[in-house]
Image (spheres, helix red, strand yellow):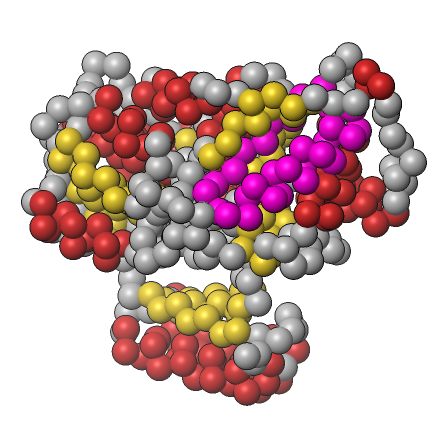
């Protein structure tokens, strides 16, 4: 069992264990030790989002990495997928992202990419933890010229903008499109507007004035209602909302209706199937995806493989099976033909390319998938007990599963980043599944609920 790392790195309240500067330095030391590969000088890229605590953790990581004789390349605020891209393009030994993604500003996190731009497997994270807690490397102290140096990469934003534009078909542009863009006051506040504007779109940008504490605050992909209202107000063609580290994206169509990750996967997968470019005619999604996605892809002649929740598990399955498209309902989309991890801006460009090629609006494209009614209820818990070991809860869930049978499903899982139990139900009757979800939530609350 991992003590520090969750489903997406180490995460918590900044300046509270484990997200302290002391632990960040230890993580930096352990990672530097692991990523040394025998070359004369070793380099690790460090980037971050716009949180106030990013300065504190960045400096601690730099100190830890340099203390092990490894150089650091500092890129400053840049989307998570941008750091993955810079890591691989500069042939660095690893990349580090300081971000808590869609969480509020007081949280922060640390996650890693290997030199090829992919997130670390569980085994590597366990090795980092083992080195920290065993204190095996405490005595390793390079001196004199063997101590690492830190360099700032001033053109990181420009490099990444060029990379993103090159993923858009060269024969197309965005001239005539009016886009509302919400950058969540996060890592993409410079990159995203530049990309869409340079491709010719008229961009109405919001969430592009970060101050260290307003990241994700009433904006971004968790609040699509913001771009919904703006799209209607400005009579825009669509809205694009990113989260704090810009690895996910949520859209709204020209009428202000939300178009989530499942719809985007349906649009992209069916288009690639028609183009004979979806490898093995297979889309990789997670167990959270709506059954309507399965129906849409199957109708187009494809199939879906489901993984556990977390874009890292989607990518692992894609690499294992040789697939090129995967994603999550939350808006993480992985286009392995272009990048190694979820990329909100890149995903938006792929959708815009389909709009241009087909001449269809986003609302018209989204009709490819009709979602089944779905209800998600979160219960804050004090402990992560296996709920199927609680007799009353297990009996209630099994009873509901019997009733929905093949026309719906019940999915219960713990959040990988917060003390929450997520209760998701799908079915034909929205009122009925809402009632059942509340029954389960109330019972769980009475057994293991937290404040």
Q: Position of residue 18 (x, y in %)?
A: 68, 55
**Residue 340 vs residue 300, the one in the foreground:** 340
Is residue 408 at least partly visible in the picture?
yes
**Residue 95 vs residue 303, the one in the foreground:** 95
User: Would residue 109 be found to the left or right of residue 306 on screen?
Assistant: right
**Residue 122 vs residue 206, the one in the foreground:** 206
Seen in the picture, residue 37 relative to 330 is either above or below; the reply is above
Residue pictured at 52% horizontal, 82% vertical: 445
Q: Position of residue 232 (x, y in %)?
A: 10, 51
User: Would residue 190 be found to the left or right of residue 288 on screen?
Assistant: left
Q: Position of residue 74 (x, y in %)?
A: 57, 27
Residue pictured at 50% horizontal, 32% vertical: 76
Q: Quadrant of residue 388?
A: bottom right
Q: Quadrant of residue 218?
A: bottom left
Q: Quadrant of residue 132?
A: top right
Residue pictured at 21% horizontal, 14% vertical: 171
Q: Position of residue 393 (x, y in %)?
A: 55, 82
Residue span colored magenta: 42-70
Seen in the picture, residue 89 relative to 218 is either above or below; the reply is above
Task: Give the position of the C terminus as an image quadrant.
Answer: bottom right
Is residue 321 at least partly visible in the picture?
no
Q: Is residue 306 magenta?
A: no
Residue pictured at 27% horizontal, 57% vertical: 371
Seen in the picture, residue 395 relative to 217 is either above or below; the reply is below
Task: Give the position of the N terminus as an image quadrant.
Answer: bottom right
The image shows a total of numbered marks equal to 0
User: Would residue 236 be found to the left or right of residue 145 on screen?
Assistant: left
**Residue 21 vs residue 406, the one in the foreground:** 21
Seen in the picture, residue 212 relative to 223 is either above or below; the reply is above
């Amino acid at each position: 069992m991992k003590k520090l790392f969750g489903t997406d790195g180490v995460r918590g309240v900044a300046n509270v264990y484990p997200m302290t500067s002391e632990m960040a330095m230890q993580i930096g030391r352990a990672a530097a030790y692991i990523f040394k590969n025998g070359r004369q000088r070793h380099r690790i890229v460090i980037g971050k989002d716009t949180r106030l605590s990013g300065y504190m953790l960045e400096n601690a990581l730099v100190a830890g990495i340099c203390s092990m004789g490894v150089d650091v390349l500092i890129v400053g605020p840049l989307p998570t997928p941008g750091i993955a891209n810079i890591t691989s393009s500069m042939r660095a030994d690893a990349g580090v992202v300081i971000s808590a993604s869609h969480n509020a500003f007081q949280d922060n996190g640390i996650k890693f990419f290997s030199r090829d731009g992919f997130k670390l497997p569980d085994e590597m994270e366990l090795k980092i933890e083992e080195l920290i807690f065993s204190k095996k490397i405490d005595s390793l102290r390079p001196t004199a010229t063997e101590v690492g140096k830190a360099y700032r990469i001033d053109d990181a934003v420009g490099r990444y903008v060029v990379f993103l534009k090159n993923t858009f078909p060269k024969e197309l542009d965005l001239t005539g499109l009016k886009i509302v863009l919400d950058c969540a006051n996060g890592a993409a506040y410079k990159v995203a507007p530049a990309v869409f504007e340079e491709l010719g779109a008229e961009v109405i940008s919001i969430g592009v004035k970060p101050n260290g504490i307003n990241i994700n605050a009433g904006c971004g992909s968790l609040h699509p209602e913001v771009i919904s209202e703006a799209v209607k107000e400005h009579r825009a063609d669509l809205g694009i909302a990113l989260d704090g580290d810009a690895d996910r994206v949520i859209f709204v169509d020209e009428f202000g209706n939300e178009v989530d990750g499942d719809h985007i996967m349906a649009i992209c997968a069916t288009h690639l199937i028609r183009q004979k470019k979806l490898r093995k005619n297979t889309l990789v999604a997670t167990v959270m995806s709506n059954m309507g996605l399965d129906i849409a892809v199957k109708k187009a002649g494809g199939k879906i493989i489901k993984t556990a929740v977390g874009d890292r598990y989607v990518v692992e399955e894609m690499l294992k099976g040789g697939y090129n498209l995967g994603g999550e309902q939350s808006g993480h989309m992985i286009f392995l033909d272009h990048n190694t991890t979820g990329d909100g801006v890149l995903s938006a460009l792929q959708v815009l390319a389909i709009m241009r090629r087909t001449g269809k609006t986003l609302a018209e494209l989204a009709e490819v998938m009709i979602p089944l009614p779905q209800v998600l209820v979160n219960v804050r818990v004090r402990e992560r007990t296996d709920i199927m070991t609680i007799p009353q809860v297990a009996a209630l869930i099994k009873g509901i599963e019997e009733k929905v049978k093949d026309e719906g499903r019940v999915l219960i899982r713990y959040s990988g980043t917060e003390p929450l139990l997520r209760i998701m139900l799908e079915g034909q009757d929205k009122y009925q599944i809402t009632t059942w979800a509340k029954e389960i939530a109330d019972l769980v609350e009475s057994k293991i609920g937290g404040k």
